[in-house]
């Protein structure tokens, strides 16, 4: 595939993703806006894939080493923190009572 | 692993992310959706791991343990009331990672003979620019929410000029890089200017406008990640990043609309600025404030038919959500109909109050959105305002001179009686006077929200 063909293909995907994002998100009730933010926050943690590719390339300079390593550290914090926080939030949304009484914060 | 196979597996991850967002439309399925998304993320990491092969695998593993360990501990330990700053923090590190990837990529291609392909270059510089803004901005948002620095708007003369100059300077260097002036220091200037811009652009924004800022920064990180996908020619990053970018943008617009202000107005107006003039106007016709004791209020509540709680950021600060829930339970056991009216921008992030009350096990059908809640106030006996201020300020309806004029509010003054729980008569976060407090229907119950609610519980019990 020539370089420009690939670029056009990528732009196509990008634009479709915008519409898909708007479509999916507009169905989320305001009740769940915080988990939505937190959930999308976890999803952009997918940047870890890019960070791994950078750190995983052969014959890299010391500079790339340090930058790539830092990127993987930051991205992993994003992924794990994002999904865990979202899970904690969503766990709390209940339509009925839980049997166990919450202890006071 | 072949290019095609890994891309197909990335497609599975993309589908899992879409399902994760799709499932969020229903509170009962939402948690399952998040788990599907997490599984998709694990798949993407494994695929990438196999693709890379053995190169530096141990370094990747160590970096993941450090970052993941920090993320897991921080996310588990944090109090539910500190959620907004956690979201800001994890958003910022994502943006930082995107900026670092851009830096490494540019460093890799620059020494080569001839100019790099323009689209790669554009992806790199914009990813560095937006990622850095998101990183620095999120860290300031985190510091503000964590109260490491003051939450009030910080403004100074020439602020817009300095911000504008930084942004244009950063963007100028970025464009010069793309145009063919291929010096690495141009990217350093871009990053430095973007970091400074990120700091300076969030600093002047008041705490009450945080829901808009946080969702905007979320969108920024998503876009930076999508641009990173162009650098690395990776569909997964493009689609997932842009999904987040689109959703963050939409959420930003929704929050701004809920305040009836444009996004630009929220970001650049320095909301606190107008407060002195408005306060002077309001102070002029300020009538008497009626203050009540907890016993008085307890009697009102216990003999009401319908009570509506209106929570605001003060509820989060006082951590009074469990106490409010206990009071509500007590009232319900006495046959009082209880619900909660939630303003879309109450708190510090979109939907903040819903999460807070969910933590206290308030069943979500009791949480009413503004459109649903407002018609109910006229048949409400007592509206209890806990730590909310601007979102119940009638000036937004009546006073054209008020900085919040035009913002849709919860019409608590339609209720028979309004009880306002408030620490003191200081104006709220935005520094705007609230005529609701001087309304003859209103009684004030001064003190810490948690202490006041506990006192109410004690006083309602024997009735």
Image (tube, grey):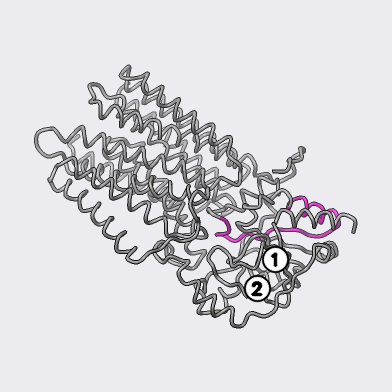
Q: List x then y, in percent, for residue B367.
A: 67, 55
* Mark nearer the N terminus (2 vs 1): 1
| Picture residue at 53% right of the left edge, 70% below the top | B407
Distance CA(mark 2)–CA(mark 1): 9 Å
Q: Residues within 10 Å of mark 1 (few under 14, many from 20)?
A: many
Instruction: Indicate whether B255 appears above or below B109.
Output: below
Q: List x then y, in percent, for residue A2.
A: 17, 36
- The residue range painted magenta reads B324-347
Q: List x then y, in percent, for residue B102.
A: 28, 38
| Picture residue at 9% right of the left edge, 37% below the top | B114
Q: Is residue B329 magenta?
A: yes
Most extreme residue toward the top is B54
Looking at the figure, which quarter contains the N terminus of chain B?
top left
Q: Nearer the viewer, residue B155 or A81?
A: B155
The mark found on residue B380 in the picture is none
Q: Dot 1 corresponds to which residue?
A: B420
Q: Nearer the viewer, residue A67 or B102?
A: A67
Count of labels in the image: 2
Q: Mark yes or no: residue B373 visible.
A: yes
**Mark 2 belongs to chain:** B
Q: Nearer the viewer, residue B172 or A35?
A: B172
Instruction: Indicate whether B417 appears above or below B70.
Output: below
Q: Is residue B304 left or right of residue B84?
A: right
Looking at the figure, which quarter contains the C terminus of chain B?
bottom right
| Picture residue at 12% right of the left edge, 39% below the top | B115
Q: Is residue B444 magenta?
A: no
The mark found on residue B436 in the picture is 2
Residue contact at pointers 2 and 1, CB within 8 angstroms: yes
């Amino acid at each position: 595939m020539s370089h420009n063909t690939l670029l056009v293909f990528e732009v196509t995907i990008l634009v479709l993703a915008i519409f898909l994002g708007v479509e999916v998100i507009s169905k989320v009730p305001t009740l769940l806006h915080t988990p939505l933010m937190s959930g999308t926050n976890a999803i952009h943690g997918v940047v870890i894939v890019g960070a791994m590719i950078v750190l995983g390339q052969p014959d890299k300079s010391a500079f790339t080493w340090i930058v790539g390593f830092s990127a993987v550290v930051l991205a992993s914090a994003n992924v794990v923190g994002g999904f865990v926080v979202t899970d904690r939030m969503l766990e709390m949304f209940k339509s009925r009572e839980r049997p166990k009484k919450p202890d006071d914060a | 692993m072949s290019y095609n196979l890994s891309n197909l597996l990335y497609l599975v991850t993309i589908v899992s992310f879409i399902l994760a967002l799709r499932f969020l439309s229903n509170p009962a399925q939402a948690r399952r959706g998040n788990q599907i998304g997490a599984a998709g993320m694990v798949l993407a990491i494994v695929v990438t791991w196999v693709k890379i092969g053995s190169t530096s695998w141990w370094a990747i593993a160590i970096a993941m343990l450090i970052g993941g360990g920090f993320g897991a501990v921080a996310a588990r330990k944090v109090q539910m009331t500190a959620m907004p700053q956690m979201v800001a923090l994890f958003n910022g590190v994502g943006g930082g990672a995107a900026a670092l990837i851009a830096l490494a990529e540019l460093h890799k291609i620059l020494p080569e003979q001839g100019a790099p392909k323009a689209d790669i270059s554009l992806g790199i510089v914009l990813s560095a620019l937006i990622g850095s803004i998101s990183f620095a901005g999120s860290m300031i948002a985190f510091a503000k929410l964590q109260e490491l620095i003051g939450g009030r708007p910080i403004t100074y003369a020439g602020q817009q000029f300095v911000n504008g100059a930084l942004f244009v300077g950063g963007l100028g260097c970025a464009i010069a890089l793309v145009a063919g002036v291929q010096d690495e220091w141009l990217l350093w200037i871009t990053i430095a200017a973007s970091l400074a811009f990120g700091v300076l652009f969030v600093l002047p924004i008041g705490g009450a406008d945080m829901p808009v800022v946080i969702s905007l920064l979320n969108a920024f990180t998503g876009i930076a990640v999508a641009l990173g996908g162009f650098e690395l020619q990776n569909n997964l990053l493009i689609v997932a990043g842009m999904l987040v970018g689109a959703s963050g943008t939409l959420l930003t617009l929704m929050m701004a609309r809920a305040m009836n202000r444009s996004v630009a107005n929220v970001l650049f107006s320095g909301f606190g600025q107008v407060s002195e003039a408005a306060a002077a106007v309001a102070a002029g016709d300020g009538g008497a404030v009626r203050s009540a004791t907890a016993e008085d209020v307890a009697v009102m509540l216990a003999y009401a038919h319908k009570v509506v709680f209106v929570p605001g950021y003060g509820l989060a600060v006082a951590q009074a959500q469990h106490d409010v829930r206990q009071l509500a339970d007590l009232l319900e056991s006495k046959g009082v109909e209880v619900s909660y009216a939630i303003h879309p921008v109450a708190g510090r992030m979109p939907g903040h109050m819903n999460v807070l009350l969910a933590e206290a096990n308030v069943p979500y059908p009791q949480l009413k959105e503004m459109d649903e809640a407002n018609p109910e106030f006229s048949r409400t006996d007592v509206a209890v305002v806990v730590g909310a201020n601007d979102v119940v300020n009638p000036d937004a309806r009546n006073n054209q001179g008020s900085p919040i004029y035009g913002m849709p509010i919860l019409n608590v003054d339609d209720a028979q009686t309004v009880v306002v729980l408030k620490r003191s008569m200081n104006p709220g976060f935005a520094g705007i006077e609230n005529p609701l407090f001087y309304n003859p229907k209103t009684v004030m119950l001064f003190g810490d929200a948690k202490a006041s609610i506990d006192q109410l519980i004690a006083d309602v019990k024997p009735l």
